[in-house]
Amino acid sequence: SVSPKILKWNFNSKKKTKQIDTLGIKLLPGLRFLDAGQGREGVEDLEDLKILGPSGAAGVYRISSLEKIKFNNQYFDELMFMYKEDCDLAYRLFLAGYNSLYVGGALIYHDRTVFGRGENDLKVVLNRKNKNKKVKEWSFLNQHIIFLKFWGVQSFSNKIRVAWFSLKIFVFVLIFERYLLKQYFKLFKIKNNIKKY
């Protein structure tokens, strides 16, 4: 798979910007995913960027590789309506031994509804106040589907990171976003439909 350079399109002013929307999906320890370069303006130091896969905003995939990793005739996991479904696909391709490249010479523009603000916990938390509740519900559920789906293929140390990240999420939700607790019940209802790797 291949990811282009995706810059932010300002929908309100109908103008191109120089701000990075994404250069592709980056994998962090603990099965955390983020859009590489998001929010930055310069990419000079990112030209040799290693990515897990392209964002769902735009990507090119080899059909033969998609055919090898599909499940129940699905490339994207249909349990995941929106948000993180591209991370799931990229991770399945990675586990199957496929590589993904960032190609900075290919350029598109994208208007993103939900925009990240960084990797550290504080920046993530501060950015949440700007996100739509429905988006948070989808993203929350899908992240937990990913945890369950890929738990068995994680190293011991990464299982500890996943468990720690899950605990932090739970405590945060319990204190600040209790409406997300119902997603745990939804996860329990669909757990038998999650294909575990």
Image (spheres, grey):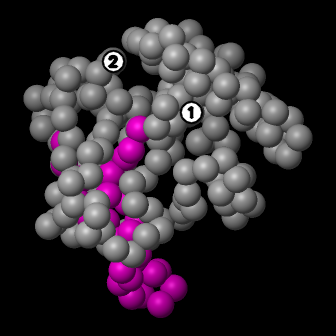
Q: Position of residue 164 (x, y in %)?
A: 67, 25
Main secondary structure along the magenta-highlighted residues: strand
Tell me the crowding category of disc 1: few under 14, some 14 to 19, or many 20 or more residues within 10 angstroms, Cα based: many
Q: Which residues are magenta?
A: 1-27
How far, Cα to Cα, is label 1 from label 2?
20 Å
Q: Is residue 174 magenta?
A: no
Q: Mark 1 or mark 2: name the one nearer the start of the chain.
A: 2
Q: Which mark is residue 143?
A: 1
Q: Position of residue 166 (x, y in %)?
A: 67, 27
Question: Residue at the location (28% across, 60% down)?
Answer: 46
161 lies left or right of 112: right
Task: Name the residue carrying label 2.
Answer: 72
Tell me the crowding category of disc 2: few under 14, some 14 to 19, or many 20 or more residues within 10 angstroms, Cα based: few
31 lies left or right of 5: right
> Disc 2 residue type?
Asn
- Which quadrant of the figure has residue 53? top left
Question: Residue at the location (57% across, 61% down)?
Answer: 117
Q: Nearer the viewer, residue 107 or 56?
A: 107
